[in-house]
Structures are given as C-alpha cells and as structure tokens.
Amino acid sequence: MISASDSFFDLFCWRMAGFWLKWLFRRTGPMKRFHHKFTLPAILTLLVLAIAGLLIGYFNYEKQTTLPPNSNSSAIGVELNQSQDYVDLHKLQANGVSFVYLKATQGRSYFDDDFLSYRDQILGTQLAYGVIVTYSNESTSNQHYRYFLKKVGRNTGTLPILIRPASSSTSSKYLRSIGRFAGMLKQLGKPVMVEENYKYHGYFPQGTLFMKTGNKAANKLKYSFWQYTTDGRVKNVSSLDQGVTMVTYNGTVQQYKQKYGQLTQ
C-alpha cells in the first residue's frame, strides 16, 4: 500500500525536478545561446546532481517508519506474531514505536509460538502492550474463553484486549457470539476492544471499545485505535522493513499517557 504521504513525496520530487529544468532553460535559453564549450556540460552536471539529491532523499524517506496518512498521531504501535522473524523490542522502542499488540490465541486450539517470549521481553522495555484474540466462527464463546485463560491468563498488558473476527461475516449470530466473549473478558476487569465497524456496537457490552481499519482517518468519538496500514515498516528494524501491521492511538498524547504510559518517540 502506498500511503498518502508517499504519494505527496513522489509528487514533490517530480515538481522539484521540473522546477530546476525550467529554471535552467530560462537562464540559458535555446541551445544556440551556449557560447562556451563548458556551459552545457556544467548545466547537465548540476541537473544530474540535483536529481541525484532528490533520489537520495526519496530513498532515505522510504526507510523511515510509516506514519498514519494525513494525521498527527500521538502514539504508534505494531502487531507481532510468529509469522515474522523475531524482533528485538528494544530496537522498536529506539525507533519511535510506543506499544505492541501480540497475537495470542484463536479458537480453542491455536496459540502463537512467539507470544510468551515477546511478553517476557517486554518487561525489560518501556513499551505498552496488549494481546489479540482472533475469534473463530468454528468455536463457541466459552471455548474461546477457556482456551484464552489457559494459555494467556490475566497478564494481558495495559492496552485493551483486542478481539479480531476471523470471519468477514456480520451475521447477527456471529456478532452476538463475539459480544458474549467480550462480556466474559470484561468480567476479568480488563478493557476490551473489537476490530469491527462501530455501527455494530449494539451487539457488544457497554464500554466495549472499537478499532478502525483502513487508510481513512478514524472518527475519534467512535474508535479508540486505528489500524492504518498492513504494509508498513519500522526504521532500522530489518525484520520489519515491509508488510507490518501498524496501529495508532486515536486520541491526544496526554490521553494516551494517562491511560497507557509514556511515548517512546
């Protein structure tokens, strides 16, 4: 996915190149006006250097951490799971990431291989963290709950527990089942968030939070977090140079600090 900020930078580069070409042409005029044998080579050299500078700037920009498009984000985070190469969380912290979401369980039988090691490693950092439960339509709410308690327990971090539907179905039966599971988690005294359209909030217990997905900015009154890309990158972390799912807190810096801790940016 190419973010809005990427497109803006591409346009900026081309406009700058065009500006230099027009400037040089106005200064020199048509080819017949070159009276010195070194004039044209010098101009071409300057043009090549200008374009090279723009390209270097562009590629350096491409290595930067992906930020939300058209947004002044307060805190950004990434999702981690066993499908990625193992990530040093201290490197994340050193490069502007404030929190992580760890994939934990799905249904009544799947448990992410890297969950426990990441959770242990977080203790030595300033990162906030939360856990992801992928909700299968092939298991009941009770089965999800029992397996989650068995494998994860109550140590779920300071961020809301995120429930992610495994199915794109928005049937009443499926949403009610997820809602029952959300209610069970809330009884543990944990904040719960669902990755779902807010228009379905009536299926979930009062106080359930929502996460928006997609590159369009999230409504701050309806969504607490925003998953703004699934193809992001984190600067200076080789295993997270592409294809990273990235999330931002959909509120102010002060609100984030009050609820979840300090930013690392």
Image (cartoon, grey):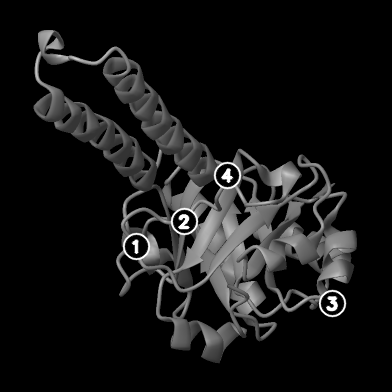
Give how far across and how far down residue 85 sits, in percent. 81, 42
Dividing the picture into quarters, in which one does residue 161 lie? bottom right
Q: For the residues carrying marks 4 and 3, which lies nearer the camera in this image?
A: 4
Q: Quick check: 147 left or right of 222? A: right
Residue under label 4: 63
Disc with the residue nearer the chain's start (2 vs 3): 2
Within 10 Å of the Cα at label 4, are there few (<14), some (14-19), or many (20+) other Cα atoms? some
Residue 13 shows in the view: yes
Q: Which amino acid does label 4 sit on?
A: Lys
Q: Do the residues labelled 1 and 2 touch (CB within 8 Å)?
A: yes
The residue under label 1 is which amino acid type?
Ser
Residue 125 in the image: x percent, y percent?
A: 79, 75
> What residue appears at the point 32 percent right and 36 percent down from the top-left corner?
13
Cα–Cα gap, marks 2 and 3: 26 Å
Nearer the N terminus, badge 4 or badge 3?
Answer: 4
Q: Which residue is drawn at 26% across and 37% down?
A: 16
Mark toward the viewer: 1 or 3: 1
The one nearer the camera, 166 or 20, is: 20
Which residue of the protein is positioned furthest toward the top in this rendering?
A: 32
> Is disc 2 surrounded by few (<14), some (14 to 19) or many (20+) residues within 10 Å?
many
Residue highlighted by disc 1: 71
Q: From mark 2 to mark 4, how far is it between C-alphas?
A: 12 Å
Task: Kindly give the residue lying farthest to the front in the view shown.
Answer: 36
Which residue is labeled 3 in the image? 123
Q: The residue tagged with tag 1: helix, strand or loop?
A: loop
Q: Left or right: 3 with respect to 262?
A: left
What whole-number distance in Å separates the C-alpha atoms at marks 1 and 2? 8 Å
Q: Mark 2 points at which residue?
A: 67
In space, the residues marked 4 and 1 are separated at their CA atoms by 19 Å
